[in-house]
Image (tube, grey):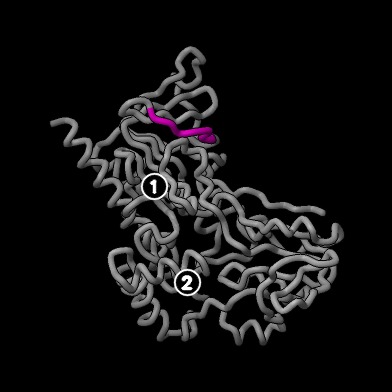
Amino acid sequence: MQLEAGTLQAAGSQAPSDDERDPALREVHVDVVVIGAGQNGLSVGYHLARKGVKFVILEAHERVGDIWRSRWDSLRLFTPARFDGLAGMPFPAARYSFPTKDDMADYLEDYAKKFSLPVRTGVKVDEVTRSGDRYIVTTGQTRYVAGHVVAAASSYQKPKIPDFAASLDPSIRQFHSGVYKNPGQLNPGSVLLVGASNSGAEIAMDLASTHQVWLAGRHPGHIPVAYNGYFAMRLVLPVVLRIVFHRLLTVDTPMGRKAKSQQLSHGLPLIRVKTQDLDAAGVRRVSRVVGARDGKPMLDDGRLLDVSNVIWCTGFRAGLDWIKLPIFDDTGRVKQYRGAVEGEPGLYVCGLHFQHSTSSTMIHGAARDAGYVADKIGERMRAAAG
């Protein structure tokens, strides 16, 4: 059996400084270390730069934007370009077009260049620890010492795959949605997508013309209008994205706290694909997959599915276990409010699922969350300076 879980990590690289090349100089002192050069990390960097703060952004990939380039070939953003720009730089596309994943990757790379953000690409963080009131970010032979650290690596780092995946027949090709690229990766025959939220539905539509597709899981609901119609583009999406997702469904409202619990366990409503789209494409929707029997995936009603491929659209874990500090609750989530980590003054996160609101993991929500984190860092630095 090929079980290709593939860990998605943040990406991007500029040449290290002369100090970092010198093996005798293993410590670099800065005010802030930002980990991850995706939309969240770059947004934090933008706001820090405007405050005159000395900082560095560490990126594991070789180019800024590679985390987007690694997604499946046909992926387009769920939101039109008018909502896809970061602070200070509108997205360079028609307002009501839907950029491709490569468009987004190139935009992030151009954003970092436009604002001369100090990104160090090809730098993987091994661990974050604390010594007194300073944080130590270890990356190979270099230790970054800083009063503030922002983990901006999003909630999508380590794929979640159930243990019973190992009990499926070895002839079944299976992997996580995080490493799906195109239909050419699959064996001939039918494919089961486990997880019916946005990624599962989008990949189902991508595969429907070449494979018999089964889509398993609880239907998360959907936006009840055509996402790309005139009415939706000019009225519904602005209301949903800017008001409902951005201002109403937050951790500060009863409605938002209820939504947070639901979204953390079941995902967002379908944005682009509707159930009628799946039906028209011939996608067969079934109930949850709960285990394996006789080498086949088993549904919650006991039915076995005879498939040649399984794609696990089962989400991700935050993958922040390289932070060696007591910041996690019993579920493994970071204890934080709007990015400020409880019990660790100077440590922040940015890009977590429902960090503050539904929009926190969306591009148009990155600027607000990043601005809040940067403001808190600025306040703390002014207080320390007296």
Dot 2 corresponds to which residue?
A: 97
Q: Quadrant of residue 380?
A: top left
Please report the residue visible at 41 percent of the width from the left and 61 percent of the height from the top: 354
Q: Quadrant where the C terminus lies?
A: top left
The crowding category of the residue bearing disc 1, from other C-alpha atoms within 10 Å (few below 14, some 14 to 19, many at least 20), is many
Rendering coords of residue 241 (x, y %): 37, 72
**Disc 1 residue type?**
Val
Choose between 194 and 199: the one closer to the eye.
Answer: 194
**Location of residue 303 by image quarter:** bottom right
Residue 249 occupies quadrant:
bottom left
Q: Residue at x 56, y 82 (%)?
A: 274
Residue that badge 1 annotates: 349
Residue range corresponding to the magenta coloring: 123-130
Instruction: Decide which of 58, 86 is in the foreground and name it.
Output: 58
Q: Is residue 129 magenta?
A: yes
- State the separation of the CA atoms marked 2 and 1: 31 Å
What residue type is disc 2 on?
Ser
Q: Secondary structure at mark 2?
A: loop
The N terminus lies in which quarter of the figure? bottom right
Q: Is residue 100 visible?
A: yes
Q: The residue tagged with tag 1: helix, strand or loop?
A: strand
